[in-house]
Image (cartoon, rainbow, N blue to C red):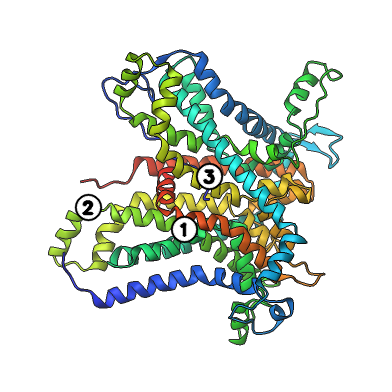
Amino acid sequence: MNERTPVLDIVCHLILLLGAGLVCLPIYFVFVTGSLSQQEVMRVPLSWLPGDQFLTNTMTVLRSANFGRLLLNSFIVACGITVGKLAVSVIAAFAVTYFRFPFRLTAFWLIFMSLMLPIEVRIVPTYESAANVALPLNILGGWLGLQALVDLDWNMVNTYPGLILPLIASATATFLFRQFFLTVPDELCDAARIDGASAWQFFRLILLPLSRSNIVALAIILFLMGWNQYLWPLLLTTDPDMSTAVIGLKKLMPQSDSVPTWHLLMNAALLTMLPPTIIILLLQRWFVKGLVDSGK
Amino acid sequence: MPRLRWPFLRKPAASAGQPESGLKRAHFNEWRLPFWLLAPQLFILLLFFFIPSIRALVQAFQLTDPFGAMTQWVGFQNFERLFRSSVYWTSVQVTLVFTLAQNVLTLSVALLLAFATNHIARGRGAYRTVLLLPYAIAPAIAGIMLAFLFNPRVGPIAQMLQSAGFDWDPNRNSMHALALIVMAASWKHICYNYIFLVAALLSVPHSILESAYLDGAGPIQRFLRISLPMIAPTLFFLVVINFVYGLFETFAIVDATTRGGPAGSTSILVYKVYQDGFVTLDLGSSAAQSVVLMALALLLTFAQFRFVERRVNYSV
């Protein structure tokens, strides 16, 4: 096809520029506001050019709003979720595709069911489960009339395991790996067995290296998800030291009865969105692959 | 994130050597190793998925006082109370308007951008890089950013609206508040739709477009008459995903911008479950709402497989 459509070309570029502008405008204002002083933010109309208070604001945010600790927490939680999800999903997918054993399909359907109910629809009981992980044992003990014997208390509120573990089970990641394993040629497994490899060796030495690109692509998505999540850390952290960066922002939101600190909030917001943005910019190709793979 | 969900459960090709569904021909006959491989996933699911889900179901038929001291069975009373509450129906209405508006806005803008990207020859990569940025940004931050831009006292866009004579105030006017969360939700989610649409448009067979071109169809006509019907499966998929996103994943946006206000006018269903469960401590009602949401989630999963799996397809 060799058609010339100069007008449509220009219109398309204009549409895309407008779209890019709409994406960038809020981010730009986060930067501008984050670099102004408190008085300058309250001035009408707001300045469209950055001020010179950026580093001062950043220091305030890191010191008095404790954002250094919060960013570290976000990092630990996001990494924990990423590594944990990948680990439990890849071995579960290996189990359901490469082994014949009783209840194989039952296990598969149990994992599949978790796809249907997002955490948002079962907030309260999930929170109760994390507030006392031993709860099921206690209930069981109550039924058996052993209440005196079984009264355990294992509270996961304000702990890293509490922030990480409940989010680790992932039907999606399991399916993604299962889908991929089903496309791996059977001959590889045959050959490994002829050479005397055990199932675990086959997994470690052949299957896992083959899955590398899938793992990387998925890891990016999972890290972004872990970093950006909101509801679970909101419920599970009452100690300001254990909160994540995104939750910390909520606490900087101007309240009606205090002097608004938009400049600090915006500065902190920029710090919080920086790591995921850098990841997306550097690893865009992988990220798009991961997204399209996991969507389908 | 869009949360990673709804993968297509494609049935494996029924080749001759396939003994069981989803099992490799070359497989191991062993049960101890797979048991330990599945144990972590299933154990976490049991603790944090199955037990909570079952307890949500049970609690929906119980009445517990806020201090958790007394529990009694009340049958369907929680549901009766819920369905008689006008506050709940307001929330249903708000959710409906919100998810629909968000879906239409997100999909149409993404479609426009995808068409433009597909049409131009140069600079695709640069545009794509910028347009994907919101994916990296937390929904809560998207909410905060738009809340700032549209803040009637300090926000630059709100100031422009006001100086143009438009009395903009999302803190008082419920329509403005609703518009604000729709914009924030779409701003965050357009990029997700966009990626899938660009990928789908790229996969439209070139031969068909070429023959349409020879028949004298222009770019817009080709898009409307050929590309659009051919990417229908992707469109259906995105509509379902957008509903899921609007229903379940916009909690952070609401909590960071309007907190359900003014006067409950942006209190979508997920937000109300949280409010009743953790703020007003009406556990029975919260559990009943959870069950309604679970039913919705199941319905959407079903829709997902029904529409998308069967794939409205015109393969060549």
B279 w.r.t. B175: above or below: above
Residue drawn at x 52%, y 58% as measured from the top left:
A277
Mark 1 nearby-residue class (10 Å; few <14, some 14–19, many ≥20):
some
The Cα atoms of the two marked residues, 3 and 2, are separated by 32 Å
Residue B311 in the image: x percent, y percent?
A: 34, 43
Q: Which mark is residue A210?
A: none
Q: Nearer the viewer, mark 1 or mark 2?
A: 1
Between tags 3 and 2, which lies in front?
Answer: 3
Residue at 43% x, 36% y: name it: A176
The residue to which callout 2 is attached is B205
Residue beneath the point at 19% across and 73% down: A4
Residue A281 numbered tag: 1
* Residue that extends furthest to the left in the rendered view of this protein: B214
Under mark 3, the amino acid is Leu
Which sits earlier in the primary sequence, circle 3 or circle 1?
Answer: 3
Helix, strand or loop at disc 1?
helix
- The residues bearing labels 3 and 1 have C-alpha atoms spaced at a distance of 16 Å
Viewer-closest of A30 and B109: A30
Asked if residue B263 shows in the view, the reply is: no
The subunit carrying tag 1 is: A
Q: In front: B58, or B218?
A: B218
Disc 3 is attached to a residue of which chain?
A: A
Are dots 3 and 2 on a single chain? no
Which residue carries the number 3 mark?
A222
In the image, B302 versus B202, the foreground residue is: B202
Is residue A50 left or right of B299 when viewed as pictured?
A: right
Within-10-Å neighbours for mark 3: few <14, some 14–19, many 20+: many
Q: Amino acid at mark 1?
A: Leu
Q: Assess whether mark 2 and mark 3 are in contact (beta carbons under 8 angstroms).
A: no
